[in-house]
Amino acid sequence: MAKATTAHKQKTPCQECPLRDLPHFREFNREELNFVSNFKKGELTVDAGATILLEGAYSAHLFTVLSGWGFRYKLMEDGRRQILNYVMPGDVVGLQGSVMGEMQHSTEALSPVTLCVFEREELMTLYNRHASLAFDLTWIAAQEERILDEHLLSIGRRSALERAAYLLAYLYQRARTVHLFNGSKVIPITQQHIADTLGLSIVHTNKTLKKLAERGLIRWQERGCDVLDDEGLATLAEWEGLDEGKRPFI
């Protein structure tokens, strides 16, 4: 397991948060910003491959992704893995454990990840004193449910080719809205990650990705998947794409 290093001092003041500059996110009012600034206790930096939260564990903290890629997953007793969803800047990690007492899934870093750290014991203060921020957390949870609905539809009803096209279009469009690419269009995942997300064997996944490459939609590279035509992927999957409206974050 990769190591994680904790920064106890707040490195990025909330007033200077780079996510606030992105048009994808709604702006805080001054009172909200002051509260979140005090709510934040520091930052956590984890290496690619590190476990951020483990299924069944109790965590005193919840997090917001400040930078990097990660994924949520569940493991079966024999080691088989199902990837549930992917996390990117602005996503909350650990909210489930804050409400239910312990995590029902694990979260791992796909790339180096920086997280804003919040103490779960102070979550009730947010709900009691800041209705707008409480609504934001509810919105984030509802959005996660909406995304999982689409993922379940994909696994249950789309063909293997459509599943892969949907997943890569989804990841690409999400990453683009939060400026994760920095001039590149490469999604830092392996074919095993895709197989574990789509419920396919690695052999079937490899054949499916080759078909997408033959259509000129993607190019597989050693460091990940280079998306060449996200609109073509979405059309193939019969997916309408992401809602480009503003969304909240904490």
Image: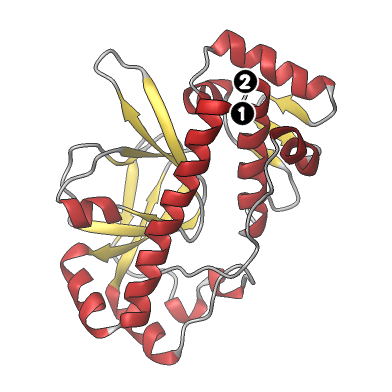
Residue 40 x, y percent position in the rendering: 31, 71
Amino acid at pointer 2:
Ala
User: Residue at image x 64%, y 38%?
Assistant: 187
Residue 81 x, y percent position in the rendering: 38, 23
Using a 10 Å C-alpha cutoff, classify the residue at mark 2 as few (fewer than 14 neighbours), some (14 to 19) or many (20 or more). Answer: many
Reply above or below: 82 against 51: above
User: Residue at image x 43%, y 77%?
Assistant: 14
Mark 1 → mark 2, Cα distance in angstroms: 5 Å
Reply above or below: 248 against 75: below
User: Residue at image x 59%, y 8%?
Assistant: 203
Mark seen at residue 160? 2
Depth check: 93 or 38 in front?
A: 93
Q: Is residue 61 left or right of residue 88?
A: left
Amino acid at pointer 1:
Arg
Depth check: 185 or 84 in front?
A: 84
Number of residue marks = 2
Q: Is residue 103 left or right of residue 48?
A: left
Reply above or below: 93 against 202: below
If the image is split into quadrants, where does the C terminus sit? bottom left
* Residue at the bottom extreme of this rendering: 30
Q: Is residue 73 left or right of residue 226?
A: left
Tag 1 residue? 163
User: Residue at image x 31%, y 16%?
Assistant: 79
Q: Secondary structure at mark 2?
A: helix
Q: Secondary structure at mark 1?
A: helix
Residue 91 x, y percent position in the rendering: 45, 57
Regarding residue 37, the answer to whether it shows in the image is no
Q: Are marks 1 and 2 in contact (CB under 8 Å)?
A: yes
Determine the image quadrant of residue 220. Answer: top right
Regarding residue 231, the answer to whether it shows in the image is yes
Determine the image quadrant of residue 103. Answer: top left
Depth check: 166 or 222 in front?
A: 166
